[in-house]
Amino acid sequence: MTSRNISLSDGGPFWGKVSTGTLWGRLAAGAIVGTFACGAQAAPVTISNINSSEPNLFTGATLNAAGNQVIIEFTDFSASAPQVVGPVAIPFVSAFDTISFRLTAAEGWFFTSLDYIEGLQGTATNGGFAFGTGSFTYNGTSVTLGTFPVFSNGGSGVSVGSLFTSPTIQLGPQFTTLDITITNSLFAGALGANATATIAKTSALLNIQTQFIPVPAAAWLFASAMVGLVTIGRRGSFA
């Protein structure tokens, strides 16, 4: 009986024991390549379809370099009362805007969680008052952020800063795309001769987390290795 050696490499202490020409050698090589290929990838997310109903309030949305936070951009998103227009002082002033955008995970990735944080600052004097409300929606599911009130019963007034913070929402492998809509309403009222009120948005951040699904890539590598082994086995048998 004649033995046949189909080993393709025989150098080094590791490859000398596990040759790439053997079944276990090729499976080991495929596993190593797959491990490094998966580990070398970043967690890429892209942002698109950015739209604001009042572009002078919400001005845009920017994804940070790490791909785990969306910074909501705005200019002077505020409401101040009274608002003087010519000879008339308007006692009630509001500001409203909605911004929407789409987040897409790269192939092989999915979104695992998200949460929204928003800062507000308000002042009120001599009977003035203000409040802000907000919500955000992901893939049709709405999350209410509550109400941020600022009241003054008179005197020098108050100044309050606070944050809307949503609960952390757990997602899963089916969430490879997120359609996000963020809505804000700001309202200020001045009910006296010397009353004033102002409320303004100071920050808005959407935090996201992603995860890679290694199964499809590993399965592909395993299948490729098996096809290669079968091909080499057949060539060895018929040589």
Image: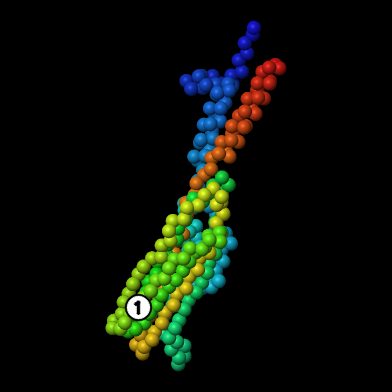
* In the displayed structure image, the side of residue 209 where residue 152 appears, left or right: left
Q: Quadrant of the C terminus?
A: top right
Q: Position of residue 125 (x, y in %)?
A: 33, 82
Along the viewing direction, whichever of 193 and 41 lies nearer the viewer: 193
Q: Quadrant of the N terminus?
A: top right
- Name, please, the residue furthest toward the left: 155
- Name, please, the residue furthest toward the right: 238
Compared to residue 2, the image places residue 190 above or below, namely below
Res 123 visible:
yes
- Amino acid under label 1? Phe
Compared to residue 7, the image places residue 107 above or below, namely below
Along the viewing direction, whichever of 105 and 36 lies nearer the viewer: 105
Which residue corresponds to the image point at 65% horizontal and 23% vertical from the top-left? Answer: 232
Badge 1: few (under 14), some or many (20 or more) residues near its Cα, within 10 Å? Answer: many
Along the viewing direction, whichever of 21 and 96 lies nearer the viewer: 96
Q: Which residue is identified by label 1? A: 151
Which residue corresponds to the image point at 43% horizontal and 86% vertical from the top-left? Answer: 91
Q: Position of residue 142 (x, y in %)?
A: 51, 63
Compared to residue 95, the image places residue 194 above or below, namely below
Helix, strand or loop for disc 1: strand
Q: Position of residue 27 (x, y in %)?
A: 56, 27
* In the displayed structure image, the side of residue 10 where residue 207 appears, left or right: left
* In the displayed structure image, the side of residue 129 where residue 32 appears, left or right: right
- Name, please, the residue furthest toward the top: 1
Q: Position of residue 108 (x, y in %)?
A: 56, 45
